[in-house]
Structure formats: structure tokens, C-alpha cells
Image: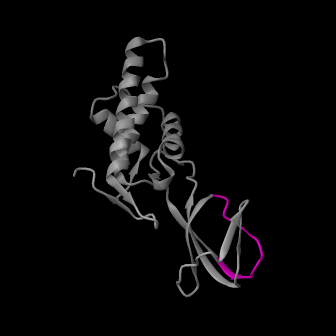
Amino acid sequence: MSFTCSDAISLALTENWLDETLDSVQVLTWGTNFLRRIVKKDFWAAKTQVFNGSLADTWYALPADFIRSIEIQEANGVIAKRSYSIRNGQIKFAISGSYTLLYIQYPTVLATITTAVPLPDAFLYPMSEYMVFKFYNMENDDKDRKDRALEYESRYKESLRNIYENIEVSNRIEVTIDVYS
């Protein structure tokens, strides 16, 4: 199951963390910021890139959204170990052949408030708390708002800490969540 920025705001309104509707542009900005800057890279989505008929010792451009590799498989499904080099946005293989690169991609900007956020559902609460924090943090001259901002900043950070302690991330980016144990 996935969630959206709209779901995060609905949660905040349902829980009475907010008493007014937020601007969609701000929600998108905060949602994208949460995804790209707040959440650890280990939880970003994985993607594949196929390199068909690659020649040995020839550099090929990596995808523009490449962050780090998870694994590289040869055409026969065998994991390629030490038979490739990655440098300066390029990859080369020691042996000619076809390869599939599984990699972590840099998250794209969320297009709309109904765009699925590419994170496990466990991140809905901290994203919602983060957006509430950002809302209350807009006006620093109001002591009550500043106090609420600090409260929600603490809440989203604690929620993330709990998730990170209870989620296992394997080297293949399969995520297992056991938040309530």
C-alpha cells in the first residue's frame, strides 16, 4: 500500500494537529523535501537499468538519477562481483556482455498531492508530523506557534528514529517493517 501528501495532511487534520487546510504548493514542497532530505537514502526506491551488448573496458553513462548500486547481474542471472567499475557517473565492465544494474535512484519531485510517495506506509506519520512542523515553523515571532513547531519537530524525528530501529533493509532493498514489536 502507498500513501500521498494528501493522506499526510488528512491525517494531521483528523488527529487535530492542524485546524486549517494547507496550500497544495507548500504541501508538495514539504513532501518532496521530506523524501529527498529527511528520509535516509536506504529507503529510497530502487530501479534497474539494462546494459545490453556492453563491450569490455568501455565506459557507459549511468542513469541521471543514480545514487548508488545495489547489485549488478550478468545476463544469466549471476551476480557480477568485481567485474565492473563505477566512476564519475559512468560504469564499465571487465567482460563484454549484457548486464542489469539494480540501483538506488534519487527521488523525483512529487508531481501532485495525490502522487504516491515512494516510501513504506510506516513513513506516513512522520511525514505528516514533518508537514505540521513546517507549517508552525513559518512564523517565528509567535511563541505559541514556535512551541508547537518544536513539539512536531521532536515528534517527526522520534517517529523516524523508531522506524529506523525497527525496519530491516537488506542489500537488495527489500524492506521489512516491524514497528510494533
Q: Is residue 135 or residue 158 the one in the foreground?
A: 158
Q: Residue furthest left?
A: 181
Question: Which residue range is magenta in the image?
Answer: 51-65
Q: Is residue 138 or residue 78 the one in the foreground?
A: 78
Q: Quadrant of the N terminus?
A: bottom left
Q: Taken as a whole, is the magenta stretch helix, strand or loop?
A: loop
- Residue 84 found in image quarter: bottom right
Residue pictured at 76% horizontal, 71% vertical: 59
Residue pictured at 35% horizontal, 54% vertical: 167
- Residue 136 at x, y percent in the picture: 43, 23
Question: How did the renderer colour the structure?
Answer: one colour
**Left or right: residue 3 compared with residue 85:** left
Residue pictured at 49% horizontal, 46% vertical: 35
24 vs 71: above or below: above
11 vs 81: above or below: above
**Left or right: residue 115 compared with residue 20:** right
14 vs 115: above or below: above
137 vs 106: above or below: above
The reply to whether residue 177 is in sight is yes
- Residue 96 at x, y percent in the picture: 71, 85
